[in-house]
């Protein structure tokens, strides 16, 4: 499932720094903001590999960049609906 170990394993200031600046710098280096849906490129593969890092995913959870999403439920038409807290 996880294919990368490039992100710092834990936050040890001076040895291994987990911080948002490092993550954003890497995203810019990988040109994440300029990648478009539907286009295929080695850059997408490189980005996907970098994002598939357990330590990065775990760190991003602590940054409050993403809102928690409650479990989905099925509406009367059978479609799944996600409920996002406000």
Image (spheres, grey):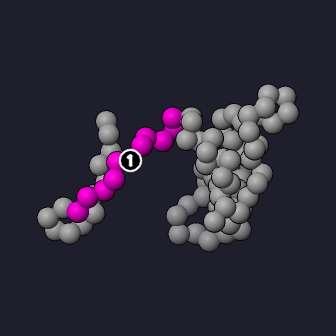
Residue at screen point 56% across, 34% down: 63
Most extreme residue toward the left is 76
Horizontal and vertical percent position of residue 48: 65, 61
Between residues 40 and 67, which one lies in front from this camera angle?
67
Give the SS element for disc 1: loop
Answer with the quarter of the image where residue 3 lies.
bottom right
Horizontal and vertical percent position of residue 4: 73, 58
Horizontal and vertical percent position of residue 59: 63, 41
Question: Residue 71, can we see it?
Answer: yes
Q: Which residue is mark 1?
A: 69
Q: In the rendered view, would you say 14 is above or below 7?
A: above
Image check: 69 left or right of 35?
Answer: left
Q: Judge the density around disc 1: few (<14), some (14-19), many (≥20) Cα neighbours within 10 Å.
A: few
The quadrant in which the C terminus is found is top left
Between residues 80 and 23, which one lies in front from this camera angle?
80
The reply to whether the magenta stretch includes residue 69 is yes
Horizontal and vertical percent position of residue 75: 18, 61
Q: Which residues are magenta?
A: 64-74
Q: How many marks?
A: 1
Most extreme residue toward the right is 15
Question: Residue 44, can we see it?
Answer: no
Between residues 12 and 38, which one lies in front from this camera angle?
12
Q: In the rendered view, would you say 68 is above or below 43?
A: above
The quadrant in which the N terminus is found is bottom right
The reply to whether the magenta stretch includes residue 73 is yes
Residue at screen point 53% across, 69% down: 38
């Amino acid at each position: 499932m996880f294919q990368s170990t490039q992100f710092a394993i834990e936050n040890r200031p001076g040895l291994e720094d987990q911080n948002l600046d490092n993550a954003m710098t890497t995203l810019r280096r990988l040109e994440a903001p300029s990648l478009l849906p539907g286009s295929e490129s080695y850059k997408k593969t490189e980005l996907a590999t970098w994002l598939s890092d357990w330590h990065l995913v775990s760190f991003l959870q602590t940054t409050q960049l993403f809102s928690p999403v409650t479990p989905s439920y099925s509406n009367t038409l059978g479609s799944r609906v996600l409920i996002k807290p406000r």
